[in-house]
Image: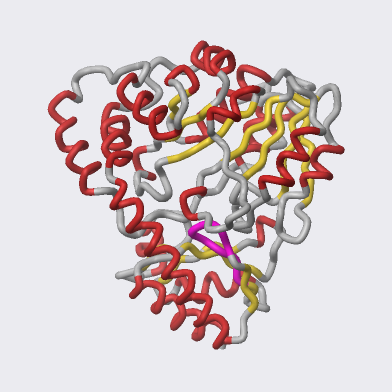
Amino acid sequence: MKLTIPDYIQAIEPYLPGKPLEALEREYGISDSIKLASNENPLGPSPKALAAIRQSLSTLHRYPDGAGHRLTRKIADANGVSPVNVVIGNGSDDIIALLVRALVRPGDRVVVPRPSFLMYDITATAAGALVDDVPLKAMTMDLDAMARRVTADTRLVFVCNPNNPTGTVVTQKDFDRFMARLPDDLVVVVDEAYIEFARSADGLKTGKSSDLDRPLVTLRTFSKAYGLAGLRMGYGIMPAALAEVLNRVRQPFNVNAMAQAAAAAALDDRAFLQETVDMVHRGLNELYRALDRLGLTYFKTEANFFLIDVGQPADTVFENMLRQGVIVRSMCAYGYPTYIRINVGLEAENRRFIRALKTALH
């Protein structure tokens, strides 16, 4: 079959998610494996979310609420904004796609940090935009360099905070200075997929009513701290005028009924969210101590994942650990050839990871 595909589409390197546990176990002939590669919540979803899912099953023959009225109201109340400032999506990357679809034309420019979440590049490139990648500085987004890359043709700027894969944050002070250097009509997108785990006292956190005076978009997700990755549920907080534009191009039923019910219930379960955050912080402290004993370099994080320099080819360590039933993420594709990334697991999983890492390194 001969297809005419635009060059900018042909140039896209596909996003490669980690393989599911079942597929890896079949491929490698292993069992009882643990996955610490996708920054998921090892506790699973909130019991309240699971109960809401079960309750929603009897109405699956009905279309979901296309506007997500109940969920949108809960999200707005939780963040101190109005429902007109909230757009729900099939994961926060759905909101990224809506922003690009609504605002970016072929030949426009989009500024992104690198390395960071790959869907910024992929989505912008798929729209025919020119992507200006700005390298990190000391593992953190270089906001000064990003501001210098903005031109009259720039339509979007992406800031990932905490940044994936480095787990670093920018400060509120640095972000305010950055915003002051940008045109007032330039849309800035702050991706806060991991913000629930951040511990830094001076770290940036957006999504407040005071952030709605200019085109600033905050992205959040239920995939990480809330443990609903399999349902694909995210949202954006933004000025009402921009939300109205995104709702014009949004698919009418982009968030399914189970996801809406589970997310609404998860927001109500503050105790479970706190349990998750506490577990992650305890796990990070335990893992840091174990890596100190091994003499390895690692990079402290404001997220539920972090980078470890294993001092040898990361792909080799990844394969060695996989054969022990421990799935981590090699960072070769992100430009860190000797680094792996892991997320915090349950206490027993963290200890198993350390044992497997010792074996893999020696």
Task: Tell me which residue sits at (56%, 25%) in the image.
Answer: 238
Asked if residue 16 is positioned above or below residue 292 in the image, the reply reads: above
- Which quadrant of the structure image shows residue 145? top right
How did the renderer colour the structure? secondary structure
- Which quadrant of the structure image shows residue 71? top left
Front-most of residues 201 and 238: 201
- Which quadrant of the structure image shows residue 122? top right
Span shown in magenta: 301-308
Percent x, y of residue 310 = 62, 76
Indicate left or right for 45 with 55 as reference.
Answer: right
Task: Tell me which residue sits at (34%, 29%) in the image.
Answer: 74
Observer able to see residue 119: yes
Indicate left or right for 163 with 65 as reference.
Answer: right
Task: Tell me which residue sits at (61%, 51%) in the image.
Answer: 203
Percent x, y of residue 160 = 63, 44
Percent x, y of residue 62 = 21, 18
Percent x, y of residue 259 = 31, 33
Asked if residue 193 is positioned above or below residue 109 in the image, the reply reads: below
Asked if residue 246 is positioned above or below residue 22 in the image, the reply reads: above
Indicate left or right for 196 with 162 as reference.
Answer: left
Q: Determine if the magenta segment contains residue 294.
A: no
Task: Tell me which residue sits at (45%, 65%) in the image.
Answer: 281
Front-most of residues 315 and 135: 135
Indicate left or right for 118 with 261 as reference.
Answer: right
* Quadrant into which the N terminus falls: top right
Front-most of residues 267 and 120: 267
